[in-house]
Image (cartoon, rainbow, N blue to C red):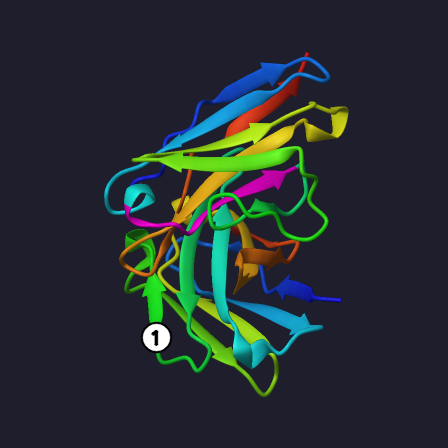
Amino acid sequence: EVQLVESGGGLVQPGGSLRLSCATSGFIFSNFWMTWVRQAPGRGLEWVANIKQDGSEKSYVDSVMGRFTISRDNAKNSLYLQMDSLRVEDTALYFCAREGRDLDSWGQGTLVNVSS
Amino acid sequence: QSALTQPASVSGSLGQSITISCTGTSTDISGSNFISWYQQHPGKAPKLMLYDVSNRPSGVSNRFSGSKSGNTASLIISGLQAEDEADYYCSSYTRRNTYVFGTGTKVTIL
């Protein structure tokens, strides 16, 4: 069974940093692109970033470019999102997802709350 | 990277059919066949319902179908059931190797 489990969320002040993790199992992690998607409270889905199987290609939504860094460790079957210079508007539930046939498997999300 | 445009809400009675539209631009929908639809129940993760415009993943009911014409993609839900009440999001893979989601549509069963 494919499983994705996010962790690392929490309360952080504006300007602070957090590192999200996504532990995966049930599939060959190194065969898939991986993605982060976020959802602000009561709002819609927003694609954040993705990364190629070997980490050689990464893309970001404009609003996080230069502040967030996506990475992966294929030996640990894990995906990461380093979030720096956090803003109030980054407050959201962050999901990791597998890019199989589009985003075919999702975790349950980890909540990031940026507030003073 | 503007969000794709969906109606805020669509409603229908049990057994009826409804259509949810998703309008984009030449840089996303009209230039891509990687159009997908996701269902999200409150407090749950999104679930892939259709990929590549009209293909259903294993386990998804054939009451869900999709199409695309120009800049607009559509999700059709036929034979509405109570469990179909949820939020629905379209998504398009773009020419920049990124994804863009729609604004989301709340489906209500009357």
Return the residue found at the far left.
B26
Q: Which residue is mark 1?
A: A57
Asked if residue A15 lies left or right of residue A10, the reply is: left
Question: Callout 1, which amino acid?
Answer: Glu
Q: Residue at x 66, y 74 (%)?
A: A27
Q: Position of residue A61 (x, y in %)?
A: 33, 55
- Letter of the chain that mark 1 sits on in the rendering: A
Residue sitting nearer the eye, A21 or A3: A3
Return the residue found at the far bottom.
A75
Asked if residue A43 lies left or right of residue B4, the reply is: right
Q: Position of residue A115 (x, y in %)?
A: 47, 47
Q: Position of residue A47 (x, y in %)?
A: 43, 52
* Residues drawn in magenta: B31-40
Q: Residue at x 44, y 64 (%)?
A: A17
Q: Residue at x 59, y 68 (%)?
A: A22
Asked if residue B50 lies left or right of residue A64, the reply is: right
Quarter location, residue B101: top left
